[in-house]
Amino acid sequence: MATLKTRMAPTRPYEIVYIIDSALEDAAIAEKLEKHHGLLELAEPAEIEHWGRRQLAYKIGRHEAGYYAIAKVQAAPGTLPEFERALKLDESIVRYMVSLVERVLGAPALSEEEMAARAMADDDDDEDDE
Amino acid sequence: MRRPKKPCPITEAGIRFVDYKDDRLLARFITDYGKILPSRLSGVDARHQRQLSKAVKKARFLALLPYVKGQTG
């Protein structure tokens, strides 16, 4: 029945955010992600968005910066526990978060000017009421 | 006297569902100490405020936003 199970296992869309030790080389990071994604038994390769190194908003242990990578995958829920166990054991993964993609997030991306214009318009927006 | 309702800034930005990874957007809806701004002050509608609240909490976990701002160490 094992073959039937793997063939039929329905998949769901997940988004996985990784914060990886920023001391690691880019190549090592890519390799590490690939190794971990292997545990998910993906039919299609993960779609990975690399944000790269950025400052953490607060210190996590000894880390003040981290390498952010976001992976979008179609995985069977049954593969997740083993995958997460491996992530927890991996000391170079500072933090991770797996979330189910239920809806399309955000909006058509705002351009820099639009953001600036909005920020300006919002300036007179606080401390009224009462 | 009731003030006319403020338009929801998130609806105006054309956002259907708030993205927890968009720290620049989320940063506009937290106070100087890092607390979530009440919708009474920001004018965010109830649906988006609920999404915002979850998104800010996820973003904090991912160290995109601080739990407490203006604190050292």
Image (spheres, coloured by chain):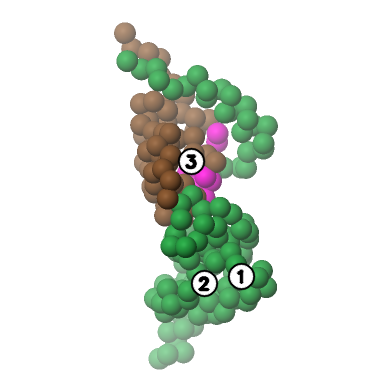
Chain colours: A green, B brown
Residue A83 in view of the camera: no
Q: Position of residue B57 (x, y in %)?
A: 39, 49
> Please, which chain is the residue tagged with disc 3 on?
B
Quarter of the image with the N terminus of chain A is bottom left
Q: Tell me whether the residue at label 2 lies in contact with that at label 1, contact meaning CB atoms closer than 8 angstroms.
A: yes
Magenta stretch contains residue B16: yes
> Which stretch is magenta?
B13-23
> Please, which chain is the residue tagged with disc 1 on?
A
Q: Tell me whether the residue at label 3 lies in contact with that at label 2, contact meaning CB atoms closer than 8 angstroms.
A: no
Question: Do tags 3 and 2 sit on the same chain?
Answer: no
Q: Which residue is mark 2?
A: A92
* Chief SS of the magenta region: loop
Mark 2, other Cα within 10 Å: few <14 / some 14–19 / many ≥20: some
Q: Which residue is mark 1?
A: A24
Q: Position of residue A109 (x, y in %)?
A: 62, 42
Magenta stretch contains residue A13: no
Give me the C-alpha separation between circle 1 and circle 3: 29 Å
Mark 1, other Cα within 10 Å: few <14 / some 14–19 / many ≥20: few
Give me the C-alpha separation between circle 3 and circle 2: 28 Å
Q: Secondary structure at mark 2?
A: loop
Q: Quick check: A115 left or right of B40?
A: right
Q: Which residue is mark 3?
A: B26
Q: Which mark is residue A81?
A: none
Q: Amino acid at mark 1?
A: Leu
Residue A125 in view of the camera: yes
